């Protein structure tokens, strides 16, 4: 993290976008497909998000290899593809891997006792002993798969039961489709149809609610891949879309951030856009709401928008809702008329939000808004250095001292608590600024450090509530919500404060501490509905979703914000965009959303 030392006190109010490291917009850099970690003595240095580094021996581009290993390809195939295409273009590597896979399947036609499907290998990540917060925490999660391998006898039994078009059926089943769906698609499109054409047909039939195309009568479904969590389908979809529309170039019209960053409108700034036309694929239920950092690497929001049915992002800085900046992008299919804010409106300036600071605030500190609230705070040594620097000069420090103090205060969100004394925000003050109830993260065994981490990774409740407020009229009897990367329950708190009953909430959150916080809040607010906790988005599959949706009738809203670790500007080691180890979990948000839409269309 870092501030902009060139901003003077007089210019501060006119600088609408503070240039902290986590918020620097990258204008000329396209996210790299491989790690920015440095190699040392034959070891790859990988950031664990906390400023420390872990080492893992192996090839120099082990991260690129792990990326494709996680998709189910063998290490031998990956090495061959990289050797042929180089390391720079992951799309060419993926094309080669898919080609190798098709050739292997052709060989399996002549060798019925062999099976060329690779089960995802166990991926090893370093965790520095702290529990991962799945919103934006910068430590590494354990993303390893479990129980995903097939025995030879099981593979043989499945292969013997396939129809005549083994190659295409096996490829489609490896993507998660059933035997019936694959067979019907081949019958309709012809045996020479490509995998891309077959997947397009199946998805189109599902989205159009034409399950009769597949089944003349209801038959038991046989899923070939069980809980396999491969991303081949989504990587293939990305490849198809990029081929169709072309990769981003310097001449392309990229999604640009607005200034001021007020989205389609805010309570105080007024309405900017009162109506929009959504793409047809985005209109059908459920409602969805996705959030991530606005200032991501170039092209990231274009990709996110393409996957989320080409819906235009809404970029909002939470400083228009509270006393702290928080630049975020939101993609959703919610109505945008008849929005209303939470009341009472939160204080919009530092002195109004923290009135005790006003007495000690020097005239030369022109700040009225806090910077983006982070997961870490300034140290006691820093505040002591500031005190000594000010005491040395008395009541009128020279301009260079003022600049130094303001820079550090902006960087670490320090506030004045006494004469020449600054201090970081207390956790309960951060809770208030983010719109959470007092003591929301306090107690229950969570440490002070983890409180800051959980809060820094959360939604700003007032901002999110303004967007979700339209649901109160739509669901007067309550809502069923799937909350992915739930964190400390920002969406749940927003809906509760809006007066929307929470009938059924399925919360998917990997951090045990965060799950405990949400469970405690649920009990303390006397919620009448059902709260179901799941731990890992990668383990949420179609069977589990159908089971849950069958028990209470489907989801009305799917909300979530996947990790921003590889998107945020503060990540100096692995700012790899959506190809990063944790930010690639966005594709699980899309995968789950698409599964829910297909299941609901079938019902």
Image (cartoon, helix red, strand yellow):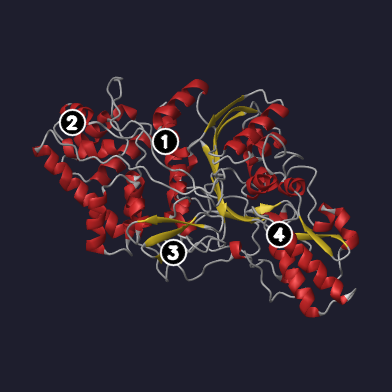
Residue 295 numbered mark, or none: none
Q: Is residue 466 left or right of residue 399?
A: left
Q: Real-space Cα distance between discs 4 and 1?
A: 43 Å
Q: Position of residue 326 (x, y in %)?
A: 65, 56
Find disc 4 in the rendering and name its residue. Answer: 378
Q: Secondary structure at mark 4?
A: loop
Q: Secondary structure at mark 3?
A: loop
Q: Position of residue 108 (x, y in %)?
A: 14, 39
Find disc 3 in the rendering and name its residue. Answer: 36
Q: Secondary structure at mark 1?
A: helix
Query: Which comes before the other along the chain, label 4 or label 1?
Result: 4
Q: Is residue 398 above or below residue 530?
A: below
Query: Which comes before the other along the chain, label 4 or label 2?
Result: 2
Discs 4/2, front: 4
Q: Residues within 10 Å of mark 2 (few under 14, many from 20)?
A: many
Residue 159 numbered mark, or none: 2
Q: Is residue 364 visible?
A: no
Q: Is residue 291 left or right of residue 431?
A: left
The extreme left residue here reads: 110
Find disc 1 in the rendering and name its residue. Answer: 595
Q: Real-space Cα distance between discs 2 and 1?
A: 25 Å
Q: Is residue 8 left or right of residue 374?
A: right
Discs 2/3, front: 3
Q: Is residue 23 above or below residue 343?
A: below
Q: Secondary structure at mark 2?
A: helix
Which picture quadrant has residue 479?
A: top right
Q: Residues within 10 Å of mark 4 (few under 14, many from 20)?
A: some
């Amino acid at each position: 993290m870092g501030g902009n030392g060139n901003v003077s006190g007089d210019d501060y109010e006119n600088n609408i976008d503070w240039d902290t490291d986590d918020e620097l917009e990258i204008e000329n850099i396209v996210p790299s497909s491989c790690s920015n970690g440095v190699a040392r003595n034959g070891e790859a240095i990988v950031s664990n998000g906390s400023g420390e580094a872990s080492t893992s021996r192996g090839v120099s581009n082990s991260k690129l290899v792990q990326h494709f290993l996680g998709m189910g390809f063998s290490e031998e195939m990956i090495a061959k593809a990289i050797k042929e295409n180089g390391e720079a273009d992951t799309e060419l590597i993926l094309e080669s891997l898919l080609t190798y896979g098709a050739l292997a399947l052709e060989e399996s036609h002549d060798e019925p006792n062999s099976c060329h499907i690779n089960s995802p290998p166990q991926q090893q990540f370093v965790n520095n002993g702290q529990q991962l917060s799945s919103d934006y925490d910068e430590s590494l999660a354990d993303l390893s798969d479990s129980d995903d391998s097939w025995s030879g006898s099981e593979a043989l039994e499945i292969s013997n039961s396939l129809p005549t078009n083994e190659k295409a059926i096996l490829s489609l089943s490896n993507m998660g489709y059933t035997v019936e769906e694959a067979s019907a698609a081949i019958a309709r499109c012809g045996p020479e149809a490509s995998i891309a054409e077959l997947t397009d047909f199946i998805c189109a039939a599902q989205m159009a609610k034409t399950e009769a195309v597949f089944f003349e009568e209801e038959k038991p479904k046989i899923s070939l891949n069980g809980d396999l969590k491969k991303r081949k389908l989504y990587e293939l979809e990305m490849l198809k879309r990029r081929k169709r529309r072309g990769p981003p170039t310097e001449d392309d019209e990229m999604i640009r951030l607005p200034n001021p960053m007020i989205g389609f409108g805010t309570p105080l700034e007024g309405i900017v856009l009162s109506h929009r036309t959504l793409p047809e694929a985005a209109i059908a239920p459920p409602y969805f709401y996705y959030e991530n950092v606005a200032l991501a690497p170039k092209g990231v929001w274009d990709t996110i928008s393409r996957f989320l049915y080409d819906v235009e992002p809404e970029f909002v800085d939470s400083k228009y809702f509270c006393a702290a900046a928080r630049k975020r992008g939101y993609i959703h299919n919610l109505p945008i008329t008849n929005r209303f804010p939470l009341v009472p409106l939160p204080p919009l300036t530092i002195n109004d939000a923290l009135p005790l600071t006003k007495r000690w605030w020097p005239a030369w500190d022109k700040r009225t808004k806090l910077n983006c609230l982070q997961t870490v705070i300034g140290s006691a040594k820093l505040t002591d250095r500031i005190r000594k620097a000010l005491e040395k000069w008395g009541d009128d420090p020279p301009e260079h001292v003022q600049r130094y103090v303001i820079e550090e205060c902006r960087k670490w969100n320090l506030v004045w608590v006494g004469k020449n004394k600054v201090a970081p925000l207390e956790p309960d003050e951060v809770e208030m600024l983010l719109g959470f109830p007092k003591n929301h993260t306090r107690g229950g065994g969570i440490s002070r450090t983890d409180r800051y981490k959980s809060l820094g990774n959360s939604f700003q409740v007032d901002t999110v509530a303004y967007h979700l407020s339209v649901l109160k009229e739509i669901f007067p009897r309550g809502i069923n919500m799937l909350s992915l990367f739930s964190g400390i329950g920002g969406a749940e708190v927003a809906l509760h404060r809006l007066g929307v009953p929470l009938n059924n909430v399925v919360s998917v959150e990997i951090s045990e501490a965060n799950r405990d916080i949400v469970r405690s809040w649920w009990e303390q607010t006397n919620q009448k509905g059902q709260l179901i906790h799941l731990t890992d988005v990668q383990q949420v599959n179609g069977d589990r979703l159908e089971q849950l949706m069958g028990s209470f009738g489907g989801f009305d809203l799917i909300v979530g914000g996947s990790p921003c670790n590889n998107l945020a500007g503060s990540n100096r080691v692995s700012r790899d965009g959506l190809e990063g180890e944790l930010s690639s979990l966005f594709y699980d948000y899309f995968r789950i959303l698409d599964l829910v839409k297909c299941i609901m269309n079938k019902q």
